[in-house]
Image: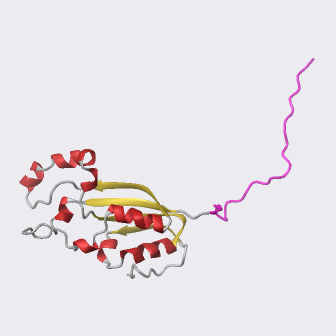
Amino acid sequence: VADPENMPFESQSIDLLVLPHVLECSGNSHQILREAERVLVPEGHLVISGFNPWSLWGASDRIPGLDPILPIPTDYQVSLARLKDWFKLLSFEMDRGRFGCYVPPCSTDTWLRRWAFMESAGDRWWPVCGAVYVVSAVKRVAGIKLVGPAWKKQKAQGARRRAVVTGRQ
């Protein structure tokens, strides 16, 4: 168990870092991303999942008279647009991303079946309104030279023998 704002790893020591809903559980999300940038090796991958504040689930916190669905306050939810902006500041390049869970929050199976059409139409008609997003980013470092593992030996660059084929006259 560790504090995500101060990860107990050496700098540039991790290839893949997965942060499932970690940004939402902290009041200092940008510091967590700075720590992720510190511990990732160049060309390392970062995978983040979070609740989308622009979705029906996220909006339930801001609609008067509705009980909040998510246990996380809207102030802590990080939108994908803000996350992309932070990626640019920290030299991450977004690799791919995906939204999901387009059905409004329902507690009965009957209503889930009634709203089921929204799952299939969500990516096509309102792609940024999914309740959950998963994003993958790559840490980019300028002027980097990739070096293979030490156990992989290079072939000798010495003299090479060539076969010479001559035609008969």
165 or 42, which lies in front?
42
120 lies above or below 33: above
Identify the residue at the far right of this view: 169
Q: Is residue 163 magenta?
A: yes
Relative image position of residue 151 (x, y in whole percent) = 66, 64
Q: Position of residue 141 (x, y in %)?
A: 57, 64
**Residue 112 among those drawn in magenta:** no
Which contiguous range is marked in magenta?
Answer: 143-169
Q: Is residue 121 left or right of residue 142?
A: left
Where residue 23 sits, quadrant-wise, is bottom left
Instruction: Specify whether residue 22 is in view.
Output: no
Work out whether 75 lies above or below 156.
below
Relative to 70, 155 lies left or right: right
* Residue 48 location (% of width, % of height): 37, 65
The spot of residue 32 in percent (x, y) is 41, 75
Which residue is painted at 47% across and 68% down in the image?
Answer: 89
* Colouring style: secondary structure
Which residue corresponds to the image point at 47% horizontal and 81% vertical from the top-left? 8
Q: Is residue 39 above or below residue 104?
A: below
The residue positioned 86% from the left and 29% from the top of the image is 165
80 on left or right of 106: right
Point 7% across, 58% down: residue = 108
> Quarter holding the C terminus?
top right
Measured along the vertical axis of the image, is residue 7 above or below residue 154? below
